[in-house]
Image (spheres, rainbow, N blue to C red):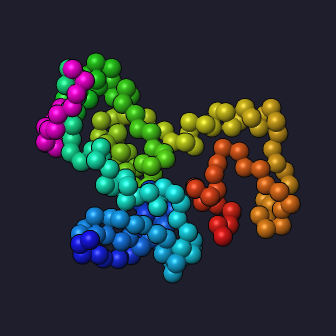
Amino acid sequence: MGEIKVKPGICRVCTAHCPVVVTTDDGRPIQVKGDPNGTPYEGYICPKGRALPELHTDPGRVLHPQKRRADGTFEQISSHQAVEEIADRLAAIIDAHGPESVALYAGSGGLAQMMGMPMGAAFLTAIGSPKVFTASTIDKPAERIAMAMHGNWMAGPLSFSRADAWLIVGGNPVIAKSSGVPHN
């Protein structure tokens, strides 16, 4: 064991940004727990947050830009070289197919990065592409079709604590901290 330190922080796996306490050994994370003094989750963090030490120390974690070789293996390259090569390839795509051939999808983990969407939108504006998609825009046609076929819930919102039962389809309130669902 080296120098053990315990510091507060926030989990950046999703947009909940849960308050956490991180234990490090010589600067390497060895444990992440929910901060019991943190609100609104009172010390709860999901399995993804608790797995952060393993994610950060995984020997297969990519720490530098990589370029795929012709034989399928990868070589480390500089950030400058990566940006230059990506810019050249994007320029060729835009020249051949127009700016609308480049789009941005923001959802899941990308939304946890506060500046991801504004930077992506600024990039698309710079190249002249209006193509921004999110989980809200991708599934809107299906939402309208489902409402037309199956109707709407017209009774208004229900209190979680007063309900006899809940059926949640397509979501995991324990992991994703869905709004309105208590976590204790």
Question: Residue 159 occupies which quadrant of the picture?
Answer: bottom right
Taking depth in this image into account, of 128 and 81 the one nearest to the observer is: 81
Up/down of 111 relative to 22, above or below: above
Up/down of 7 relative to 117, above or below: below
- Left or right, 123 with reference to 38: left
Tell me the residue at 26%/29% (across/down).
90
Question: Residue 155 occupies which quadrant of the picture?
Answer: bottom right
Tell me the residue at 35%/76% (across/down).
7
Tell me the residue at 37%/59% (across/down).
53
Let me know if residue 13 is in the magenta part.
no
Quadrant of the rendering where the N terminus is positioned: bottom left
- Left or right, 119 with reference to 105: left
Up/down of 132 relative to 93, above or below: below
Percent coordinates x, y for residue 106 in the rendering: 45, 44
Quadrant of the rendering where the C terminus is positioned: bottom right
Q: Which residues are magenta?
A: 71-85
Taking depth in this image into account, of 106 and 66 the one nearest to the observer is: 66
The number of discs equals 0
Residue at the front extreme of this rendering: 1
Q: Is residue 93 visible?
A: yes
Percent coordinates x, y for residue 62 in the rendering: 27, 44
Percent coordinates x, y for residue 175 in the rendering: 58, 56
Q: Is residue 118 visible?
A: no
Tell me the residue at 82%/39% (across/down).
151
Up/down of 89 relative to 12, above or below: above
Percent coordinates x, y for residue 117 in the rendering: 40, 49
